[in-house]
Each structure stands twice: as C-alpha cells, then as structure tokens.
Image: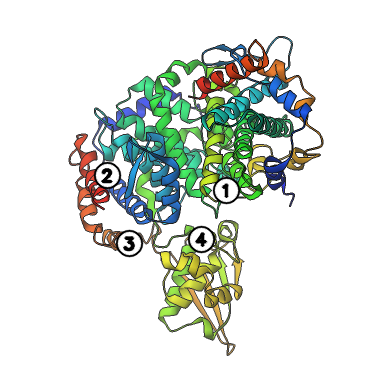
Amino acid sequence: MTTVTLALAAFASGAPAGSAAQAAARAALPGPGFLTGPYADGPTRPDEGEETGRARAAVHWTACAALHHATVHAMGRDRAEHGLAVGLEVALRLLRTLEGQVVGGWDPVGAAVRVGAATAAARMDGLGTEWAARAIGIAATQAAGLAVVAETPLGTYQHRHAAGDGLQAAHLARSGMTAPVTGLEGRRGLYALLAPTADPARAAENLGERWLITEQCLAAHGAPPAGGPENQWASAVAYAREMLS
Amino acid sequence: MTGHITPAYEEVAEAVLDAAARPLPEDAAMAARRTLYNVLAVALGAADSPEVTRLAAALATSSGVPAGPGVAGYADAPGAALLTGFAAHLDDFDDTHLATVIHPGAAVLGAAWSAGWTAEQGTGLLTAFALGCEIQLRLGLAVTPDHYERGWHITGTCGVIGAAVTAGLLGGLGRDALAGALRLASLRTVGHREAFGTEVKPFHAGKAAANGVVAARESAFGASTARALPDLSHLLLALAPGDRNPSLLLDGLGSHWEVVANTFKPYPCGIVAHPGIDAAILAHREGVRPAGVARVRYVCHPLVPELMGRLDPRTGLEARFSAVHGVAAGLARGAGGLAEFSDAAVIDPELSSMRARTELCPDEAIPRDAATLEIEAVDGSVTRWPVAHARGSLLRPLTDSELIDKADALVPGRARPLWDAVIRLGHEVTPAAVQALLEPVTQEVEAR
C-alpha cells in the first residue's frame, strides 16, 4: 500500500518551504478580483481552460482558509506563509491527480480545498505527522460537491464550506479525533471513490523537491489585492475573514 | 441505469410538506417513536465517553444550543447537531435499515436536537423525525446497491438529506425554502467507508446532521439558485454512477413507510455480525467455553468479511468491525454488550486467543441475517450452532420491552421515563412536544 496520506502529512508537518515557494504563496494571496459577484466563483475566463479555472478556484479557497486560520489564531506572518505554501501545494497536487479521472460528476475542487485547508492549518498548528494525517483523513472523508454547479453561485457555496470543513478537520484532529491514515489512497478512500483510475501516488511524487506552486502563475489564480506587500497581506487577510465568516 | 424522471427539488419538498400535513399512520408513528427512543438512549449512553467529552470540548461555546443529550455546556447549532449525531452513532449500537444498511436515527436525531431548540412554528417533532428518516431511506434505496458497494458510508451521504428535511420541517420552511435546503444539502454529503474503525465513522453521522442544519438555515440562498441545480439527477448520478432508481424517492410517499423496516441493534457492532454473536451466546449457554474449543468455522454471508473482517482489532472501535471478536466474546462471556466491545475486552487474552482460532467462511447461500458456527472441540468432536434470523432482524425484531431493557443498560433508571415521553409524541403535535421530550434530559444535565 502506498502511504500517500502519511507522505503528505509528513510534508505538512515538516517540509521547509523555500523562498521560491513562499514567494509563490504570497503571489496567491486572495482578493475580491476572484469573484464576479457576492456568491459567484468566477466563470472560466475567455483565455483559460476549465482545468485552469478549477486550479484558480482551488488556490483561492485554500488561500482563504489558510489566511483565515492564521488570523483567527494570531499566527506570525512567517508561519502563516509556510502554512499557506504547504496547503496550496497539497491542494494543487490533489487537483492535478484527480483531473480528468473523476467519476459521477463529483467536484474535484472541493476535495482539493478540504485537504489543502486541513494541511495548511495542520502546518500552522505544528501538528506532527500522525496528527496531520488524521486531519487529512477527516478532511478527505468529506469530499463532496457537484462539478456541474462549480461555476455558479452554488459553486461558491460548496467551495466556501469546503474551506471551512478543512479547517475544522485540523481542529478536530488536534483535539484528538481518530481517523484513518489511509484516507486518500485506501481501498475505500478519496481516490477510490472519486477517481478510481487515478494514481494516488502521483500526489506525493517529489514532495518537498518539486513545488507545483512555483511552476504556475498563482497571481492569476488568486487575483491579489493591489498595493505594497504589507497592504496586500492585510487586505488579503481581511478578505479571507469576510469570505469564511 | 434508469429511465425514470428524477424529481425536482421543489417536487420533493412539496411531497414532504404534504406528508407532514397529514397524521402519521400508526405503524409509521410507532416505528418513528421506537427509532427516536432507541437512538436517544444510545446517545445518552455515550454522553460520558471520552470521545464525546473530547468532541464536546472542541465544539464548546459559551452560549447557544445545549451541546447534546446528556452533555453539559453549549455549542452553536451546527456543533450541537454534530455532537449529537456523533454520540448517537459512536458505539455502533443504534439502528439499521437492512435493505440500505443506513443507520437512519443518528443524523436525524442530531438535526432534531439542534433545530428543536429554536423551533417555533414548525412541524411536530415526531413527524419531522419520521420524514427525515423516510427521505434518507428512500434516497438510499434509490442508489442501492451501487452506492454502498463503491465504498461510500451511506449513513453520512444520505443522512445529510434526511437531516435537512428534519431541520427544515422543524424550522417551518415552505416549499421553495425546503427545496433550497435540500439543494444545498446535496452539495455537502459526507462519508467514505475507509473511516470505519475510527471516530470518523460516527463523525459522518454528526457532520451529516450539522450540514443538514446549516442547509436549512441557509435555505433562502438555496431557493434563489434553483436554476443551477433544478433536480436530484446530478446527485443521484454522483452517488451511484452505475445504477439508480429515482422513482423510489417519492413513489407512495405518505402511504408506504420505509422507516417501518428500521431495526434496532442488540449488539454494538455491524449488524451482519449479529447472527454469529447470537450463535456464540447460544453455545455459551449450552456450556461451550473457549478452553474447550480447538477452532471455529464461522459460516456467514459474504458481507461479513467485507464489512466486519478485522481479525485482530486493537481498540474497542476496531472491534466493532471484527466479526471474529463478536464470536469470541459470545463464547467466552455469553454476552455482546458494550463491555465486550471495550478497549479492555479487546486485549483480554481469552478473547484474542479465541479470535485467532475463528475462521470466517463466507457462503453466498447464507442470508444476511443468518450464520452457523461449526465448533470443533479439543477432543475432535464438532457441533453446529445455526441461527436462521438474528435477534433484532426484521423477522425477529426487538420488542418494546427489549428496547427498554437495552436503554436501561445504557442509562440506568432513565429508560422508562424516556419511553413514556417518547410514546406521547404524535399525540401532542404542538412545538411544545419538542420541549416536553428534551427538557427533562437537559434539566438532569444541568443539575449535575
């Protein structure tokens, strides 16, 4: 059995995010430019494919979750950036491995956001590998939502709740809730149910060595607020709190 | 694949409201009372467990809804629903609708507990509870067997919809708003079977309750987005890509009641293992003891190894998914109660040794509620212990008296007053009935 969940948990609990990864995470700070209306995930833009649109949504909502967690728990900026980088990386890896393989019309973005948000919070909270794996397990088991509504106001609804579910998963893991450490790759885990032909092991390939977040233009996904770095951070934090409150 | 037309959310809501406006048939009312009584007793019995205590602390707020049956303190409305549903399913001692293997009471109890505290104009508790069970069971039937066989925990995935029905009815939602709640609930189904043997399994029931409560609270948004998701076809396709039958959702609603087919567990573990435990207890009563047993061939339905196949559980929760543990407990102790599925029982050398000498022998010809133990004694003689229908199964249901005895073991001294309160439900359909049932429980907690 490939221990993908534990590999991602170890990554969440310990992998250093280098300067490039942190810079990429900063470029993904969320802002109001993402949404076209108060309850609408932006429709796929004319110059991007559906796959990019899904990555944009996953980055946006995972970042909102990470920043919300950081500010509610008064995390320092450096710690928050590490959590953000790790959470975004895991979310993108999940999304990439699920893309094109999902059966039945489930929404892969919701799955990526839940696990990414849980991972970001686990990192910021300093959870060890076993506890981070539980957080991932609690988040993964809630993978739900329908792809058909992803670009409608209901898409925003399901993605916003996915972000909250991920943060709650980390909270419950921290409180001691037990969970499977094979929540992703297990015989009845997330991949088996949402995308049985996908290879979960790909989500853990070259973890800590290759950062997907440095290879994509996350600024376009996150549509960060204008202004200098400090203003951007403060605006993004305020925006994330508003989105998830 | 089906050719039936899938109902719109508004059609489902209208059918539910029509059914809610009529008196429950007596068989459905009694089934709902027994379901509510059983699951409430199970939740109360788990209230002091470390798992519930820990979760209550994690969800605690300084004010809000009473956190859960028998639990001190408060939570917000989704938190109280989560905690209550979690407690109700924690010990796997609640109920099972055999055709779908849904445990219908837990998620709906969570929704009823949470929404019941603020209900002012809504449907009476018993009707809201009965219809929450009914709609989730009908959804389960519509996607059975494909959905569960793929690995989904049907109690969580269908429970969200049932919880939204119950919370919506208690909240007095009209047709469009209730349809909106169901639409939102469809986007937040919960549960993979990978979690079995951990606290995430009861979390599924609790989170389903919470998500249903939230969907009811945000129903106006769901009503305004009808065009994006007009009917249940996309949800049904996701739940069961291989085969589904949408007609089962509403056909006969109000006249035929699936909740009547709900059954109640005499043992705190997966129901497919119950006939094996029955047979082991029978053998124990006839003098068979592990010391005299060389080995046991446990002839069972193939779902037993699939769902209850853990051979060497390490915790009480894992033991709930170990059919060989249930047989070992039955042979060694002549019982299969909470004590036999505790962490301490799991490491009992007599039980672990007996587990190792028990072999699961699946046989397609064995019905789900039957099993035979072939016990080879140390002297080489073999005796057979067949059980045609397990205790608590549809053909051998627990009587009211057995249900009260079960509750008395869980909540000593409180089983009879609770029964009396639940039995009155349906005869008083005003919202006050909610308080009449729930207040004594809360007063007792506050007095501690």
Q: Front-most of B101 and A101?
A: A101
Front residue of this view, candidates B380 and A15:
A15
Identify which residue, B362 or B209, lies in the foreground. Answer: B209
Q: Earlier in the sequence, mark 2 or mark 1?
A: 2
Q: Residue at x 32, y 37 (%)?
A: B65
Image mark 4: chain: B
Q: Residue at x 42, y 26 (%)?
A: B181
> Which of pointers 4 and 1 indicates the residue nearer the eye?
1
Q: Is residue B155 visible?
A: no
Camera-side residue of B445 and B392:
B445
Q: For the residue carrying disc 4, how many other residues have a C-alpha within 10 Å: few (<14), some (14-19), or many (20+)?
A: some
- Which element type, helix, strand or loop, lies under badge 3? helix
Residue under pointer 3:
B406
Label 4 belongs to which residue?
Answer: B367
Q: Secondary structure at mark 2?
A: helix
Q: Residues within 10 Å of mark 3 (few under 14, many from 20)?
A: many
**Where residue B237 sits: x, y (%)?**
58, 32
